[in-house]
Amino acid sequence: MNIKILPAANEDLINGYHFYEGQSQGLGSYFLDSLFSDIDSLLIYHGIQQQFFGKYYRLLSKRFPFAVYYTLEKPDIIVYAVLDCRRNPAWIAGRFKVNE
């Protein structure tokens, strides 16, 4: 399987980097290293997380209050968003189009 990170998710990672780098020098790089490690773990553990908003699996980061939202579209794992769990749940839901 391959992991593809969509531009919106990449922008989420960049925004997280800037936030944490503003808190302490070097923390932004640690944030990216941690999140990419979590994303890489999907190669082994994809599909075991709980689903949200219809079709998106949610992987919670081990070190930061962030969640990685992804889908399985064989042969790829598509990362749609990397969101701060401290945000308003309505804002998080607004990032996804729920087709019910």
Image (cartoon, rainbow, N blue to C red):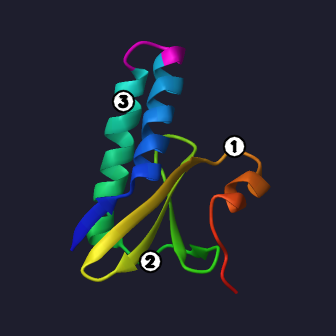
Give the crowd class for mark 2: few <14, some 14-19, many >=20 residues within 10 Å.
few
- Point out the residue furthest to the top here: 25
Residue 75 coordinates in the image, percent (x, y) = 24, 80
The earlier-in-sequence mark between 3 and 1 is 3
**Residue placed under numbered mark 1 in the picture:** 86
**Residue placed under numbered mark 2 in the picture:** 48
Amino acid tagged 1: Arg
Tags 3 and 1 touching, CB below 8 Å:
no
Amino acid tagged 3: Tyr
Q: CA distance from mark 2 to mark 1?
A: 23 Å
The earlier-in-sequence mark between 2 and 1 is 2
Q: CA distance from mark 3 to mark 1?
A: 19 Å
Q: Is residue 44 left or right of residue 38?
A: left
Instruction: Magenta stretch: give its range.
Output: 22-26
Q: Which residue is located at x 34 percent, y 27 percent? A: 29
The earlier-in-sequence mark between 2 and 3 is 3
How many tags in the picture? 3
Majority SS type along the magenta span: loop
Q: Is residue 38 left or right of residue 1?
A: right
Q: Which mark is residue 30?
A: 3
Residue 49 coordinates in the image, percent (x, y) = 49, 73
Q: Is residue 38 magenta?
A: no
Q: Is residue 24 magenta?
A: yes
Nearer the camera: disc 2 or disc 1? 1
- Point out the residue furthest to the bottom here: 100
Residue 99 coordinates in the image, percent (x, y) = 66, 82
Q: Is residue 41 left or right of residue 35?
A: left
